Image (spheres, rainbow, N blue to C red):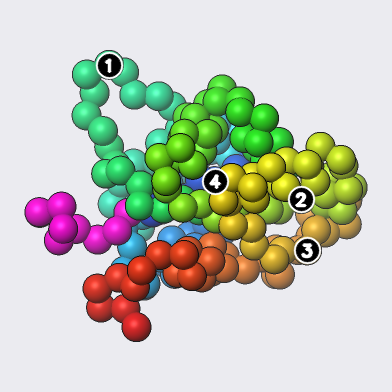
Amino acid sequence: MIESERKPFLYVVVCAAGIAGDVGKLINVAQQRGWDVGVIATPQSLAFLDSHTIENQTGYPIRSGWRSPGDARPFPPADAIAVAPATFNTVNKWAAGFADNLALGILCEAPGMGVPITALPYVNTALAAHRAFRRSVDELREMGVMFGSYEPHRPKSGGGADRFLWEEAVDLLARRLPPMAGQR
């Protein structure tokens, strides 16, 4: 396929949170809106995912580790990135420039490459109140990262999954990117 004929490619970065197993909802929305999707999982999030289902849904392997020299790139370059769920740990490491896993390496590099990014935090109220988290969100916003509207849940409740708006990641990108072929 000629580069201009390919669908835009969305990297979905998944972090370790109880709702990570629902990432298929985001993949469905993105695909319905004309994106091809590849999932990049933080190492800890792999335990939350049904890899077989996600790989069947996207047509791509889940990436979690670095490629070896000479290995083919399993995904096309990202046209955009959605981080969902974005955890306290990932948001803070990303803002501080830590690239100690593939997901963080990609996130740290993307702003310098002009790749639009949305992040849908999934944190509890205690973590959201932490000064480091607030500073990290501000820092990432200054870098152009678009944040979703999720409201933190009570600590130890594992709650809020019913209020997590997976589609908001794609909605935010639609505001930043030109319309795709076939989209209104």
Determine the secondary structure under disc 3: loop
* Residue 25 higher or lower than 63, as above or below: below
Q: Residue furthest front?
A: 142
Who comes first in sequence, dot 4 or dot 1? 4
The amino acid marked with disc number 1 is Pro
User: For the magenta stretch, what is the residue range?
Assistant: 1-9
Q: Is residue 162 visible?
A: yes
Cα distance, mark 4 to mark 2?
14 Å
Q: Residues within 10 Å of mark 1 (few under 14, many from 20)?
A: few
Report the number of discs.
Answer: 4
Q: Residues within 10 Å of mark 3 (few under 14, many from 20)?
A: some
Cα distance, mark 4 to mark 1?
24 Å
Determine the secondary structure under disc 1: loop
| Residue that carries the numbered disc 4 in the rendered image | 14
The amino acid marked with disc number 2 is Val
The amino acid marked with disc number 3 is Glu
- Contact, mark 2 vs mark 3 (Cβ under 8 Å): no
| Residue that carries the numbered disc 1 in the rendered image | 69
Determine the secondary structure under disc 2: loop
Who comes first in sequence, dot 1 or dot 2? 1
Cα distance, mark 2 to mark 3?
8 Å
Q: Residues within 10 Å of mark 2 (few under 14, many from 20)?
A: many
| Residue that carries the numbered disc 3 in the rendered image | 151
Name the image quarter holding residue 51: top left
Whole-percent x, y for residue 67 in the image: 34, 24
Cα distance, mark 1 to mark 3?
42 Å
| Residue that carries the numbered disc 2 in the rendered image | 123
